[in-house]
């Protein structure tokens, strides 16, 4: 009997990544096309995080499989399937876009592999579809614009025009603003994802005569929109408020045209804590540019996985690893974060202003805290209790 069981047990251990000696991470992000500018930030920061932990998650031998999702859901699903089945990774992570995360969420979590978002936070996986095998180290999509909605409401803005791309994150963003902003909405427009020309939308916007504009247009979309908004002569007459639009990704291209624009975020280069100071310093030294929140979240992802494996004492006990992940408290660029029952972070949200620094670079600085220790609105619908 022992002669029969031993080979079977050995084969079982080889087939299951949870018994492997090596920690395997599948990191997919958008590395090609116009959105590749975001993916580069994320990959650079992830690699810096690996440098800081000696390329060993939890002190264990580790390997990372990188993949370019090309901002296409079908490609993302193929990559996730390959990472899970062929490479038998313990974690699938990265993922910028909410529609891509929704596409891989079911297949990855059902495979009993941990899916960790370092950016996308769609509402569809934060409530009833929450999962034991999904965590976010970023935010839930609605939260950042909720902070902006509160700021607009508290500051007496009477009339706002809303604009975002037509995909899950865009819908979540505008829903977030309207959850806290109770004033008049003069228009709400969903643009094409990846759109470059906004002249028609800006003309319609101008005709509605709003008191302010809120826009969510990440990456290259934001660069094009803000430039065209300024060229239309609206920047000085109709205040522009943003989320994920004017940041370290877009500021090198926008420069003075975006100085003074206000936005809300969970992170900024000037956050005063030791982890963030080291991250910003070493990132600029290694890559020669100012990191964005995309980069900060990818760096935090490394710290999160490393910390959780150390607390769990390895990766062989999946339940112990999940419990360690739920504990939070890992040293991130945003302080020691804790998690809500739906595995999304509870954290601060700041009002940031785009500025020109003393060294001539363009960055953001925190001017106020809008929310403190703020959880998302979907956690109440999540059935997980721990």
Image (spheres, helix red, strand yellow):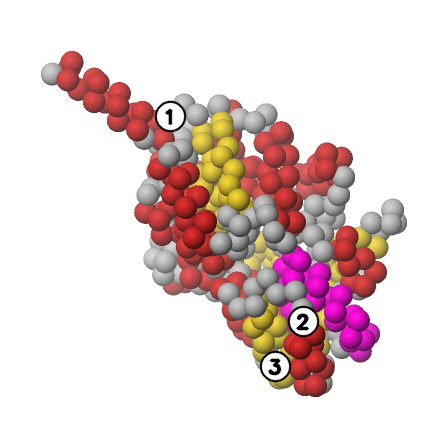
Residue 297 appearing in the image: no
| Residue carrying label 3 | 187
Percent position of residue 5, x then y? 17, 19
Q: Do the residues under discs 1 and 3 have CB atoms within 8 angstroms?
A: no
Magenta region, residue range: 213-237
Q: Is residue 342 above or below residue 262?
A: above
Q: Which comes before the other along the chain, label 1 or label 2?
A: 1
**Residue matched to label 1:** 20
Q: Secondary structure at mark 3?
A: strand
Q: Which residue is mark 2?
A: 198
Secondary structure beneath label 2: loop
Name the residue at 45% across, 32% down: 24
Q: CA distance from mark 1 to mark 2?
A: 51 Å
Residue 109 drawn above or below residue 371: above
Q: Is residue 219 magenta?
A: yes
Helix or strand or loop: what does disc 1 sit on?
loop
Would you identify the image quadrant in which residue 143 lies? bottom right
Sequence-wise, which precedes: disc 2 or disc 3? 3
User: Of the residues under marks 1 and 3, which one precedes in the sequence?
Assistant: 1
148 or 216, which is in the foreground? 216
- Callout 3 environment at 10 Å: few (<14), some (14 to 19), or many (20+)? some
Picture coordinates of residue 259, whole percent (x, y): 81, 62
Closer-to-camera residue (268/312)? 268
Residue 180 lies left or right of residue 84; in this view the side is right
As measured in the structure, the alpha-carbon distance from the residue carrying label 1 to the one carrying label 3 is 54 Å
Q: Position of residue 284 (x, y in %)?
A: 75, 39
Q: Quadrant of the N terminus?
A: top left
Please state the horizontal and vertical placement of residue 211, each as a whole percent of the image: 72, 81
**Residue 301, visible in the rendered structure:** yes
């Amino acid at each position: 009997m022992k002669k029969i069981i031993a080979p079977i047990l050995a084969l079982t251990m080889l087939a299951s990544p949870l018994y492997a000696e090596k920690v395997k991470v599948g990191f997919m992000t958008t590395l090609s096309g116009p959105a590749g500018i975001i993916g580069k930030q994320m990959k650079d920061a992830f690699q810096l995080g690996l440098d800081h932990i000696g390329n060993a998650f939890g002190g264990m031998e580790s390997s990372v499989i990188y993949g370019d999702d090309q901002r296409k859901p079908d490609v993302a699903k193929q990559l996730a399937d390959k990472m899970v089945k062929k490479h038998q990774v313990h974690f699938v992570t990265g993922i910028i876009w909410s529609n891509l995360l929704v596409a891989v969420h079911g297949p990855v979590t059902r495979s009993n592999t941990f899916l960790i978002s370092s950016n996308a936070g769609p509402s569809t996986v934060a409530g009833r579809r929450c999962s034991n095998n999904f965590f976010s180290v970023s935010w839930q999509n609605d939260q950042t614009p909720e902070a902006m909605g509160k700021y607009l409401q508290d500051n007496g803005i009477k009339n706002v025009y809303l604009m975002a791309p037509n995909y899950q994150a865009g819908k979540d963003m505008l829903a977030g603003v309207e959850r806290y902003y109770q004033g008049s909405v003069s228009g709400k427009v969903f643009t094409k994802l990846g759109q470059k020309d906004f002249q028609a939308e800006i003309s319609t916007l101008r005709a509605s005569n709003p008191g302010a504009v809120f826009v969510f247009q990440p990456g290259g979309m934001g660069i094009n929109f803000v430039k065209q908004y300024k060229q239309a002569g609206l920047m000085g007459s109709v205040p522009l408020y943003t989320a994920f639009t004017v940041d370290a990704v877009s500021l090198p291209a926008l420069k003075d045209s975006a100085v003074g624009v206000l936005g809300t975020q969970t992170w900024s280069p000037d956050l005063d804590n030791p982890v963030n100071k080291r991250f910003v310093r070493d990132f600029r030294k290694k890559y020669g540019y100012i990191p964005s929140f995309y980069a900060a979240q990818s760096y935090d992802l490394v710290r999160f996985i490393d910390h959780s494996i150390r607390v769990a004492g390895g990766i062989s006990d999946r339940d112990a690893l999940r419990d360690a992940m739920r504990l939070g408290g890992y040293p991130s660029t945003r302080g020691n974060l804790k998690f809500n029952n739906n595995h999304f972070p509870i954290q601060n949200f700041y009002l940031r202003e785009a500025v020109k620094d003393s060294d001539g670079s363009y960055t953001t600085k925190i001017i106020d805290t809008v929310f403190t220790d703020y959880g998302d609105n979907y956690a109440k619908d999540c059935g997980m209790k721990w």
